[in-house]
Image: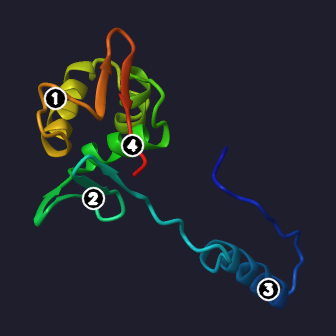
Amino acid sequence: MGLGADDYIVKPFLPRELVLRLMAILKRMYYSSSAPERLPAFKLGEYIVDLESAIVHRNTEEQPLTAKEHALLLKLYENQGRIVTSDALCQAVWGDDSYGYENTLMVHIRRIREKIEADPSKPLSLLTVRGLGYKLLVKEQ
């Protein structure tokens, strides 16, 4: 099952009842009172990472983030200061069939570091925690 049904009508029914129920469902789906939440922008040293526009700013330079880099940074930002396991990152980016993506994850982490670190070989913001995963350190300015 799990097809998303949340209402039903018993026969016989009036056409007006069908229209009213459909309008109620559409209102719930498309006219939600809460505005969509804006993704954050945060500072990492001299870099500003804007997750809303998927761009890393440094002075006048802009570096776009790929979809996978964006998903990884979002997961790391949501857990800033805490260790996020490699499995959790792979799951967040590649989904249920994420087994075997550890090497690909390392490549993506390296590319992110090239965009957000002054010296990607000696990272200060996106740290590797050996045997566990990665940690994003966002220093409040």
Q: Label 2: how many residues lie within 10 Å, few (<14), some (14-19) or many (20+)?
A: many
- From the viewer's perspective, tell me whether residue 41 is left or right of residue 6: left
The residue located at (27%, 56%) in the rendering is 48
**How many numbered marks, from 0 up?**
4
Name which residue type carries label 1. Answer: Val
Answer with the quarter of the image where residue 69 lies. top left
**Secondary structure type for disc 2:** loop
In-front residue for pair 89/84: 84
Answer with the quarter of the image where residue 87 lies. top left
The residue tagged 2 is: 54
Using the image, determine if residue 134 lies above or below residue 132: below
Answer with the quarter of the image where residue 7 lies. bottom right
Cα–Cα gap, marks 2 and 1: 18 Å
The residue tagged 3 is: 20
Pointer 4 and pointer 2: residues touching (CB < 8 Å)?
Answer: no
Name which residue type carries label 3. Answer: Leu
| Earlier residue among tags 3 and 1 | 3
Using the image, determine if residue 48 lies above or below residue 82: below
| Earlier residue among tags 2 and 1 | 2
Indicate which disc residue 107 carries.
1
Q: Label 4: how many residues lie within 10 Å, few (<14), some (14-19) or many (20+)?
A: few
The residue tagged 4 is: 139
Quadrant, the N terminus: top right
**Secondary structure type for disc 1:** helix
Residue 45 pos. (x, y %): 26, 46
